[in-house]
């Protein structure tokens, strides 16, 4: 894992101590807005690896109070007292026996770069920044940074971050360095006599406006109004043309590198302030320089470095578990279902998020005055409000089915069907809308079709309901298909796909299937949970669309299937930020 910066770790640690029992997202919102979530998440993972914090089963961050931490603090106090006694005796020699066992263990396990860093700090006896440390220890900058962090964690060194702002030329500043300041070019064009603003041709209009404003601020020009604005350079303006201004000298200084703002004197800072008001003249970048000073514990450990012939490694401790990058568990589950169905010969149907009521209701023989079409059960699209309907032949077939039963022996719903209502747009309320679309396009017989569709309903959110959810929708068409065959398919889905151990079927009603059935499975915590509904498409649907064979159809709650497979007790956990669950999920 990439080690986060010390100031980031310290900031996250302090925030955790002040705000207990928060999730990662809640804690991140307590931090400064400029901290990116990825940086914050890395710091959390780093603290988990150090065993300072942990995520509980609910995804909340807990601070780990360790006896070992308190023991180390006690040892550090004892070591400081010992070092003071040594200083009083004017002796810096410390025998190997004076080191406590914990410090000996730490020293014996130091890496090569830590050993070099510790020796340099002991020799210099002063605080060093990361560049100085890298040079004196003969290591690269990245190694020096890691060494500072590691020694700080082991209390052998005390690290700090000092932030500074560095300034360099911006995009406009680079252009001005080549082309000159707008106000200087403007003054050169004016000359020593009164000149009309319209007579200035060699400078772009946008640059004239900028130059005019800046020149006026610096008293470089005089203005008078006749038929139009007249301009003339002042004595100060003439001097400004002849020699380089403070702004130009500063731009030249910044031309080849960036400077720490602290390196400028007060007069130069005023010039920088003026340039900073001008858009894109300067770039400012905040950088943190890392410093480290050896501690008393570090001093006491130095003599033992020479006694360490080779670094010790503990081969008996459990290896840290590695969590490689992988798909979110729910997404992986969805992909596996798709692959399984495709391998069984199913064809995937299109599943647009927005559909016409024609497909969501009318093709499925739901009357236009059905309660499911009201605002309490479905959403409507505000803009655009209406969409196009398919071929007139299909529309007329559906119209006939509603008004008089069409080609079937049914009497239909006996009302006047309206095309305008059918063309209203809405977010799909169930996956069966996509089966309806497929039926109007035509199907193969025998044929198998499926889709995993995003559906939207104004439900109350709880452990088994969401207002947005995924549905595993499908149907099979063929001769001699029976209701018993449908029950067998549904049981196969529940057992093989979701891992359910007990299933049961209940009679149900849907306007578009007859007979209809509800599939339920037993959840260890939630009891019997409805997986979805199924049935045989009514003849008013299939026969009016020219399909004579039976179609066994189902619409199953994909999210609920995943709950069973992933052993979750709440459907909302499928979209959890719990890092442990995301790492250890399927």
Image (cartoon, rainbow, N blue to C red):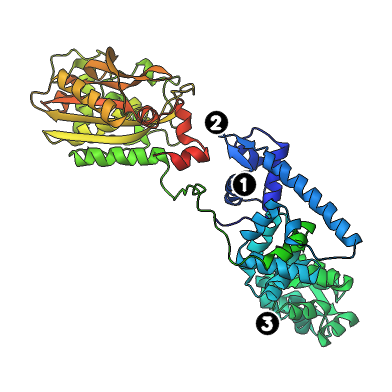
Q: Position of residue 441 (x, y in %)?
A: 20, 36
Q: Residues within 10 Å of mark 2 (few under 14, many from 20)?
A: some
Residue assigned mark 3: 178
Considering the image in quadrants, where does the N terminus appear? bottom right
506 and 311: which one is in front? 311
Which residue in the protein does label 1 denote? 47
Q: Nearer the viewer, mark 1 or mark 3?
A: 1
Q: Nearer the viewer, residue 297 or 169?
A: 297
Element marked by disc 2: loop
Residue found 67% across the figure and 69% down from its top: 116
Is residue 502 positioned above or below 356 on the image?
above
Is 343 on the left-hand or right-hand side of 288?
left
The answer to whether 472 is drawn above or below residue 49 in the figure is above
Assess disc 1: are there few (<14), some (14-19) or many (≥20) residues with their C-alpha within 10 Å of its C-alpha: some
Dot 3: few (<14), some (14–19), or many (≥20) neighbours within 10 Å?
few
Quadrant of the frame with the C terminus: top left
- Which residue is under mark 2? 58
The answer to which of marks 1 and 3 sits earlier in the sequence is 1
Q: At 78% from the left edge and 77% from the top edge, which residue is drawn?
A: 250
Q: Nearer the viewer, residue 388 or 336?
A: 336
Can you see residue 61? yes
Q: CA distance from mark 2 to mark 3?
A: 60 Å
Q: How many marks?
A: 3
């Amino acid at each position: 894992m990439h080690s986060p910066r010390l100031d980031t770790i310290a900031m996250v640690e302090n925030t955790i101590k002040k705000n207990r029992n928060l999730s990662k997202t809640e804690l991140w919102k307590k931090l400064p807005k400029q901290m990116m979530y990825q940086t914050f998440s890395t710091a959390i993972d780093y603290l988990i690896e150090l065993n300072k914090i942990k995520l509980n089963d609910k995804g909340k961050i807990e601070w780990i109070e360790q006896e070992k931490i308190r023991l180390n603090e006690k040892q550090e106090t004892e070591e400081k007292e010992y070092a003071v006694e040594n200083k009083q005796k004017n002796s810096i020699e410390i025998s190997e026996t004076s080191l406590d066992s914990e410090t000996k263990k730490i020293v014996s396990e130091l890496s090569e770069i830590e050993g070099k860093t510790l020796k340099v700090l002991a020799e210099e006896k002063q605080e060093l920044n990361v560049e100085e440390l890298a040079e004196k220890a003969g290591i690269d900058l990245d190694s020096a940074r890691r060494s500072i962090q590691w020694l700080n964690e082991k209390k052998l060194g005390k690290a700090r971050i000092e932030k500074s702002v560095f300034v360099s030329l911006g995009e406009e500043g680079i252009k001005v360095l080549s082309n000159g300041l707008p106000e200087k070019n403007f003054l050169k064009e004016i000359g020593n006599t009164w000149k009309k603003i319209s007579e200035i041709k060699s400078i772009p209009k946008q640059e004239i406006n900028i130059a005019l404003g800046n020149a006026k601020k610096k008293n470089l020009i005089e203005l008078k109004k006749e038929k139009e604005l007249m301009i003339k350079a002042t004595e100060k303006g003439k001097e400004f043309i002849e020699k380089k201004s403070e702004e130009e000298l500063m731009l030249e200084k910044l031309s080849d590198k960036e400077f720490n703002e602290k390196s400028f004197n007060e007069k130069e800072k005023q010039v920088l302030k003026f340039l900073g008001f001008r858009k894109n003249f300067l770039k400012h970048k905040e950088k943190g320089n890392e410093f480290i000073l050896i501690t008393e514990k570090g001093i006491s450990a130095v003599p033992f470095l020479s006694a360490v012939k080779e670094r010790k490694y503990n081969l008996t401790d459990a290896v840290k578990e590695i969590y490689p990058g992988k798909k979110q568990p729910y997404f992986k589950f969805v992909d596996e279902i798709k692959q399984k169905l495709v391998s069984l010969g199913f064809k995937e149907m299109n599943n647009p998020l927005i559909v016409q009521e024609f497909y969501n209701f009318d093709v499925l023989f739901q009357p236009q005055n059905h309660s499911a079409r009201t605002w309490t059960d479905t959403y409507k699209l505000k803009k655009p409000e209406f969409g196009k309907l398919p071929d007139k032949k299909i529309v007329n077939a559906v119209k006939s089915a509603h008004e008089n039963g069409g080609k079937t022996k049914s009497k239909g719903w006996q009302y006047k069907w309206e095309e305008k209502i059918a063309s209203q747009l809405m977010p799909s309320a169930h996956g069966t809308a996509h089966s309806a679309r497929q039926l109007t396009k035509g199907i193969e017989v025998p044929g198998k079709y499926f889709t995993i569709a995003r559906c939207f309903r104004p439900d109350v959110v709880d452990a088994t309901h969401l207002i947005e959810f995924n549905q595993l929708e499908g149907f099979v068409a063929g001769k001699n298909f029976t209701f018993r065959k449908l029950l067998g398919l549904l049981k196969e889905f529940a057992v093989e796909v979701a891992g359910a151990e007990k299933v049961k079927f209940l009679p149900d009603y849907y306007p578009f299937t007859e007979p209809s059935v509800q599939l339920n499975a037993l959840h260890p915590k939630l009891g019997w949970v409805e997986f979805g509904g199924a049935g045989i498409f009514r003849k008013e649907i299939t026969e009016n669309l020219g399909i004579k064979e039976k179609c066994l159809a189902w619409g199953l709650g994909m999210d609920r299937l995943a709950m069973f497979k992933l052993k979750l007790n709440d459907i909302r956990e499928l979209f959890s930020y719990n890092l442990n669950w995301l790492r250890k999920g399927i």
